[in-house]
């Protein structure tokens, strides 16, 4: 029996959750691009999630953990492996005073609002990050001069031996948009414990509302994108470099540098993943030629041939 068939049989026999074959990743990424995943699963809970990873590793299959797909450029090719969606399995929040345990599949936007409603302050900066807590830890997501590093106490991971273990925040090498998880690809984020402060619910919700209005005015939220495309090179603002290079509005077929915010590449007309990749490559090349600066994308490229 082929490994995929064996996986499907065992997964279904153990009632681990939903499973589809050849599921278009375009349906699961905020850029709305990406070819099919050979197998796409949504385990029902934390235990089923761990069992799924263990099974995949026993069968030596390729796999990818996916939250909301907000910082991801999946190629147009079929991914010959299993994509595991965290949104059902790891979508839990446990509040204990000002200490909050968050499953990796929890929505950043939703939990930021929920904590504000409870009168807990410290997560407001995440209210505009369209991903999950797992992705926010992985990227050390940040906005408004705050980042995950500022509130994170510890993270529970599933290690390469399928053992659950805790890592303290200071062990995670958290720097600008970077964490140890980008090196340790066999560590899977299960949940994060954050330390918040008692705050004023009205004030926090007002702040979230005001920031949302500003984002709507300055960012192309009405179009599919992966969020900010490029990291800020030291001493520079990425959007400004793209702007000054004359690349606002530059497009390849359906993919375009947003004319509203030049650090966003948007899917404005049925773009392919290749179109998006071509826009990113062109921006890098032009800025390298003009300024001799290397632009590094924030967006993760997935399932591309090296």
Image (cartoon, helix red, strand yellow):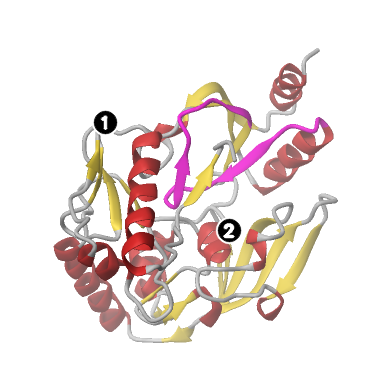
- Circle 2 SS class: strand
- Does residue 154 show up? yes
Please check the rendered image and state whether residue 275 is part of the magenta-colored stretch, yes or no. Answer: no
Judge whether residue 98 can be spotted in this image. no
* Mark number, residue 270: 1
Residue 35 as seen in the image, left or right of residue 191: left
Query: Quick check: 174 left or right of 4?
Result: left
Q: Which residue is mark 2?
A: 103
- Say if 50 sits above or below 229 in the image: above
Residues drawn in magenta: 59-81
Q: Badge 1 local density, few (<14 within 10 Å), some, or many (20+)?
A: few
**Local secondary structure at mark 1:** loop
Other residues around mark 2 within 10 Å, as few (<14) / some (14–19) / many (≥20): many
> Whole-percent x and y of residue 69?
46, 46
Which residue is at 37% across, 45% downward? 30
27 or 117, nearer to the observer: 27
Side of 242 relative to 214 (left or right):
right
Whichever of labels 1 and 2 marks the residue nearer the N terminus, that label is 2
The residue lying at 78 percent from left, 34 percent from top is 55
User: Which quarter of the image is occupied by the C terminus?
Assistant: top right
């Amino acid at each position: 029996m082929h490994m995929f068939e064996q996986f499907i049989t065992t997964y279904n026999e153990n009632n681990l959750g939903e499973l589809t074959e050849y599921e278009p990743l375009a349906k699961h990424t905020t850029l709305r691009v990406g070819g099919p995943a050979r197998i796409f699963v949504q385990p029902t809970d934390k235990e089923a999630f761990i069992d799924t990873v263990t099974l995949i590793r026993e069968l030596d299959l390729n796999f990818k953990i996916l939250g909301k797909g907000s910082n991801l450029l999946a190629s147009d090719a079929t991914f010959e492996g299993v994509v595991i969606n965290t949104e059902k399995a790891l979508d839990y929040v446990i509040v204990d005073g000002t200490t909050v345990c968050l499953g990796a599949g929890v929505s950043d936007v939703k939990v930021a609002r929920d904590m504000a409603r409870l009168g807990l302050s410290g997560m407001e900066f995440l209210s505009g990050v369209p991903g999950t807590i797992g992705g926010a830890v992985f990227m050390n997501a940040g906005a408004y001069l705050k980042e995950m590093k500022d509130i994170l106490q510890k993270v529970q991971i599933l290690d390469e031996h399928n053992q659950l273990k805790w890592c303290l925040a200071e062990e995670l090498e958290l720097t600008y948009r970077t964490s140890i998880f980008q090196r340790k690809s066999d560590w899977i984020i299960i949940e994060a414990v954050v330390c918040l402060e008692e705050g004023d619910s009205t004030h926090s919700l007002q702040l979230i509302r005001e920031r949302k209005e500003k984002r709507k005015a300055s960012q192309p939220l009405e179009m599919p994108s992966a969020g900010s495309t490029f990291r800020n090179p030291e001493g520079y603002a990425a959007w400004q470099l793209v702007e000054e290079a004359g690349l606002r509005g530059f497009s390849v077929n359906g993919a375009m540098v947003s004319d509203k915010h030049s650090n966003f590449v948007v899917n404005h007309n049925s773009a392919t993943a290749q179109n998006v990749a071509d826009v990113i490559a062109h921006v890098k090349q032009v800025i390298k030629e003009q300024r001799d600066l290397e632009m590094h994308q924030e967006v993760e490229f997935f399932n591309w041939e090296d």
